[in-house]
Image (spheres, rainbow, N blue to C red):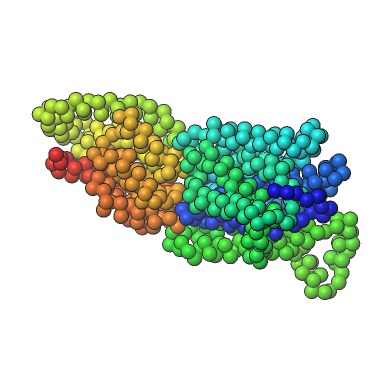
Amino acid sequence: MQRAGQTKKRRFITGFSGLRTIGVLGVILYHLNPNIFRGGYLGVPIFLALAGYLIADQVMRELRSTGHFRLRRFYGRRLKKIYPTLIVMLFATSTYIVLFQRNLLANLHKIVAANLLNYYNWWQIFNGQSYFERFANNESPFTHMWTLSIENQFYIFGPLLIILLFHLFKNNRKWLFNTALLISVISGLLMAILYQPHVDPSRLYYGTDTRLFSIFLGVALAFVWPTDRLRGKVGNRDRWTLDVAGLIGIAGMLWLIFTLDAQNSWTYRGGMFLFTLFTVLAIAVIAHPGADWNRIMSNPFFDWVGSRSYGLYVYQFPVMIFFESKFPDVANHPILYPVIEVVLIVAISEVSYRWIEKPIGQFDFRRIGEWFSDLFHGNTPQEWITRTVSAIVALIMVGGSVAVVQGAQTNPDAADKSELAQKIKANAKANDKRSKSQLAAIKKANEEKKKAAQNKSLSESLSKSQSAAEESRAKEHPVNQDLEKYGLTQVQLQRAQQLPITAFGDSVMIDGQPLLTRIFPKIYIQANVGQQMVNTIDSVKNLSAQGAMADVVLVGLGTNGPFTMDQLDQFMQAVGQNRRVYWINARVPTRQWQGQVNSTLADAAKRYANLHIIDWFAYANPHNDWFWNDQVHPNNTGSPYYATFVAKEVLNGEKNAQQVPEKK
């Protein structure tokens, strides 16, 4: 493409509001319904790539024109744009916490400081904060703020690096581009290398080092595609080429937004990088005045959302967390509650934009004395509005300050780490210790079973002798007698002692792990906080290939998100038709996918003869007192009901299976 000479005034590219709209709506809709908008979290790379492109373009434009860049002016503008909304959100949220949700007080002073000083993403990493677990850890209304820390880190250090590279390479665009591209590739490779299957990927999700590729792909584009040197008039062939490239970029972005799951291994091994490439392609075409995509991505709706995207992003999580804590029956209102949440987010963001972000962004702080004087004088409607807003902000600052002080005085070991979170952590650690030996035991049992199967009479003899031994032990050496009151017979409890099981689950299963392993000592549990179907299928395939999967498979998935029938088909095919699968359905009233998960399981049970649904939902739903405050994990009262109900269903199912003759 041809480029015209450099222009004096920077061209405002309205189409970028369209990209910001896709980004912020994607993130909000992902947080509201991750099943439909599975890749909505990819809105973040859109913001990062745009930041990289626009900042690098601004710095390079001034360097080419004057030979230097006005850092003080740049930092002043960034402060005026970012900090007013940030400070008000932090202190307003803190005020709400100290008044209505004091369980979130601990570490609040550290969280506020980390956000103000732009290292919150690293604070989350070093303090083990998960982006994906939404139940056990008193979910923070600040979880999403890691993004802003990374952006601000770039705003601080990015211009300095670009100035250094400009002078080092003497404005050689090839070297500048290659350097930015190299940084991007190293960052993308680091994300891929550090990714570990079956491990919470939050470290990669939050890390500046593993997110730099989104920013520096935008920077690389700015080095070779400066906005002031893009020619407005191009030939028809060039125009069509640009428009087709834009279509590929936008279509690729939308494809991944609807398909790329946040816990899929491909997401971290090239998926996010590919999405950023699509985004950078879209940025390049929208920025070009000779293409049609700037006009396509410009309309009043995109302009409105794009101009308020910052406020919409920062206020979304506090609104969702606080609303859902007061109205936890989200599953019963899968449409109404999200609509209310969106209305609240939009309303608060609009107020913030009109009375905080826009006025302060345009304010001349040299007139601060005059402003204070006018604040207490004058009776025009506008002056009264300003006075009212100022009073509200002052109250927010006072309330937030009280919350921060009280947060510093709150013991994090007592408040920040709930009993449930500590229990899950301890259970997971205990489960990890026994996993290796249990896996080996199941593998050995499978080998012995193969040998026994070759001798039918021996197999039948072993089965009869085992049954007789169970009845004998039930009389002479009873076990777990305290669980008989929950409906398990002593013979069942004896049978459970010898039953190998392979189990896959999430934090609910980890919560029930102590009693499950007591009832079934030969159970192997592979369960992780935040576990979902999408990252379990490969585990099933691996265990099956190793010959280390028992004939009885227990599954407890669906708490952290729904799954499609296609995914369930893949799971069942990986398990195989000769194994019996017992699937605990979901009791998660705080999430809209509860009904969808249970409906999918019910339909699947009609398709697979070896799939048996353990209807935990119907059994436990009338008993809110069985659960911790999240209404998802069984508490100390509910845990025995959970474990014994699961055990009864499995043991009854196995008894029935033994009575049905095998098909030849």
Look at the picture and state if 333 lies above or below 198. below
Look at the picture and state if 468 lies above or below 307. above
Kindly tell me whether residue 488 is visible in this rendering. no
Kindly tell me whether residue 11 is visible in this rendering. yes
User: Which of 390 and 55 lies nearest the eye of the viewer?
Assistant: 55
Which residue appears at 70% of the width and 59% of the height?
A: 14
Which residue appears at 35% of the width and 36% of the height?
A: 541
In the image, residue 424 lies at what x, y percent? 45, 39
* Left or right of 572, for residue 46: right
Look at the picture and state if 425 lies above or below 597. above
Q: Residue furthest bottom?
A: 380
* Left or right of 596, for residue 444: left
Look at the picture and state if 279 lies above or below 472. below
In the image, residue 589 lies at what x, y percent? 43, 56
Give the image quarter of residue 29: bottom right
* Left or right of 422, for residue 4: right
Which residue appears at 79% of the width and 71% of the height?
A: 382
Q: Residue furthest left?
A: 457
* Left or right of 569, for residue 144: right
User: Which of 556 and 422 lies nearest the eye of the viewer?
Assistant: 556
In the image, residue 252 lies at what x, y percent? 54, 50
User: Which of 183 and 110 lies nearest the eye of the viewer?
Assistant: 183
Work out which quarter of the rendered image holds the C terminus and state it: top left
Which residue appears at 42% of the width and 31% of the height?
A: 432
In the image, residue 427 lies at what x, y percent? 43, 36
